Image: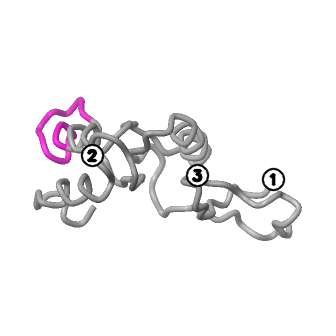
């Protein structure tokens, strides 16, 4: 089988994976999932760089996770406050995980995270 995509930290603000030649797996090993989340779990991806959002979207899709996108911290706050986590709107997504860039225009990731966590329903997110 093919080796799993393994996210690694890159200080350029993007995610990358090592070349497949560096991943050693034998046929009895089970590929590791990046998160212990059920399929269709909704992940909010917040990044002002459209390419980064696209890469994360592809990765999440590989792991059968759903996603919602925001291009800055203010959009992330707005999405969270309109999510099923906060409202009774059954049509709204219920966000289980947020992947937040820290440096963005309008509202940065630090301020957005602080704003979101002020709401008790998001304290453990």
Distance from the alpha carbon under mark 1 to that under mark 3: 22 Å
100 or 64, nearer to the observer: 100
Q: Which quarter of the figure has residue 68? A: top left
Find the residue positioned furthest to the top: 91
Query: In the drawing, what numbered circle is on residue 14?
Result: 3
Q: Earlier in the sequence, mark 1 or mark 3?
A: 1
Q: Residue, x 14% and y 46% (percent of image)? A: 86
Per the rendered image, the range of residues in magenta is: 81-92
Q: Name the residue tied to disc 2.
A: 107
Find the residue positioned furthest to the right: 21
Q: Name the residue tied to disc 1.
A: 2
At mark 3, the secondary structure is: loop
At mark 2, the secondary structure is: loop
Q: Are marks 2 and 1 in contact (CB under 8 Å)?
A: no
Residue 108 % position (x, y): 31, 50
Q: Residue, x 36% and y 37% (percent of image)? A: 70
């Amino acid at each position: 089988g093919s080796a799993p995509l393994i996210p690694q930290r890159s200080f350029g603000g993007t995610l990358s994976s090592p070349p497949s030649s560096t991943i050693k797996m034998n046929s009895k090993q089970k590929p590791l999932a990046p998160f212990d989340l059920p399929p269709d779990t909704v992940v909010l991806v917040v990044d002002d760089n459209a390419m980064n959002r696209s890469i994360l979207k592809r990765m999440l899709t590989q792991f059968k996770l759903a996603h919602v996108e925001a291009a800055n911290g203010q959009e992330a706050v707005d999405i969270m406050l309109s999510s099923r986590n906060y409202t009774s709107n059954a049509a709204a997504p219920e966000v289980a995980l947020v992947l937040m860039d820290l440096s963005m225009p309008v509202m940065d990731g630090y301020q957005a995270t602080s704003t979101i966590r002020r709401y008790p329903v998001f304290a453990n997110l």
